[in-house]
Image (tube, rainbow, N blue to C red):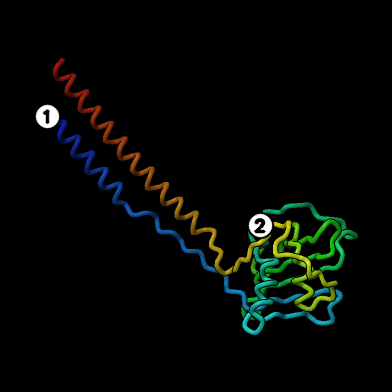
């Protein structure tokens, strides 16, 4: 009789483990990818007209300019706002997707102490955290090649002291939620498995306790 009770406890625990492990992970809500950038617009007080760089007709220049600002979308602010006198000329760079603005940043290539970049809180596609950053050392040359009236700096190498140093990121391919969802699903599976093992142990202890009490 006792053996049958213990066997039933163990069988019930095994069935519970199988049921818990077999539970499918929560469906990950696939975030909507932002539209792929198709052009970059540059505006400035010292520009007669706005500069528009099309990805299709000027792919190299487009990627060069995109690398100056794409990393700013999710970067953590690095510095406080400099004084207006220390900033120099401002160039507003807007990333466009089919003629619609998706991101906008203010670049200051001639700022005292090195290039600066500003991410305004008000963005074309929503609201972001206002933040200031150290820009890449290539900022001035990238803007000059795009058509801004800046002094040439041919000795500048790729990279910079900013958060985007050496990083060429396509904003449309950034999917920060995918990794988070995967991690949460893995943790959920781990907790389910650990919980199932704990239940089996408790069933086993209960069965042993039952056997001891019967014999006593």
Query: At 76% across and 52% down in the image, what residue appears?
Result: 79
The residue carrying pointer 2 sits among few (fewer than 14), some (14 to 19) or many (20 or more) residues within 10 Å by Cα, namely: some
On the image, numbered disc 1 is attached to which residue?
Answer: 3
Disc 1, SS:
helix
Determine which of the numbered discs, if any, sits on residue 208 in the image.
none
Q: x%, y% of residue 89?
A: 85, 68
Instruction: Report the quarter where the C terminus lies.
Output: top left
The N terminus, quarter of image: top left
Which of the 4 image quadrants contains residue 153? Answer: bottom right
Residue 96, percent from left and from top: 66, 76
- Residue 16 sits in quarter: top left
In the depicted structure, whether residue 57 falls above or below residue 207: below
Is 60 placed left or right of 149 in the picture? left
Out of 200 and 151, give the one closest to the viewer. Answer: 151
Residue 55 on image: x %, y %: 64, 79
77 above or below 205?
A: below
Query: In front here: 212 or 185?
Result: 185
Residue nearest the observer in this picture, 24 or 168: 168
For the residues marked 1 and 2, what is the alpha-carbon distance in whole angstroms?
A: 63 Å
Q: Residue furthest front?
A: 155
Asked whether, in this view, residue 174 is left or right of residue 159, the answer is left
User: In the rendered structure, which disc, 1 or 2, sits on the residue that comes first in sequence?
Assistant: 1
Q: Residue furthest left?
A: 1
Tell whether 213 sits left or right of 53. left
Rendered image quadrant of residue 148 = bottom right
In the picture provided, is 139 more to the left or to the right than 191?
right
Q: What's the residue at 78%, 60% (across, down)?
A: 116
What residue does disc 2 label? 75
Is residue 170 visible to the viewer in this orientation of the structure?
yes
């Amino acid at each position: 009789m006792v053996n049958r009770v213990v066997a039933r406890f163990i069988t019930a625990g095994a069935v519970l483990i199988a049921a818990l492990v077999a539970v499918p992970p929560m469906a990950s809500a696939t975030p909507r990818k932002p539209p792929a950038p198709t052009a970059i617009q540059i505006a400035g007080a010292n520009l007669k007209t706005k500069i528009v760089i099309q990805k299709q007709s000027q792919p190299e220049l487009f990627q060069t300019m995109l690398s100056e600002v794409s990393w700013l979308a999710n970067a953590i602010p690095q510095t406080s706002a400099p004084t207006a006198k220390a900033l120099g000329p401002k160039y507003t760079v807007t990333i466009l997707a089919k003629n619609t603005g998706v991101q906008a940043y203010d670049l200051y290539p001639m700022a005292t102490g090195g290039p600066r970049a500003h991410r305004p809180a008000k963005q074309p596609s929503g609201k972001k955290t206002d933040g200031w950053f150290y820009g890449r050392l290539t900022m001035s040359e990238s803007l000059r090649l795009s058509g801004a009236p800046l002094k040439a700096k041919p000795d500048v190498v790729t990279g910079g002291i900013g958060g985007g140093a050496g990083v060429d990121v396509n904003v449309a391919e950034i999917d920060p939620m995918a990794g988070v969802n995967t991690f949460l699903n893995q943790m959920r599976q781990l907790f389910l498995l650990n919980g199932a093992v704990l239940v089996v142990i408790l069933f086993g202890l209960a069965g042993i306790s039952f056997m001891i009490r019967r014999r006593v």
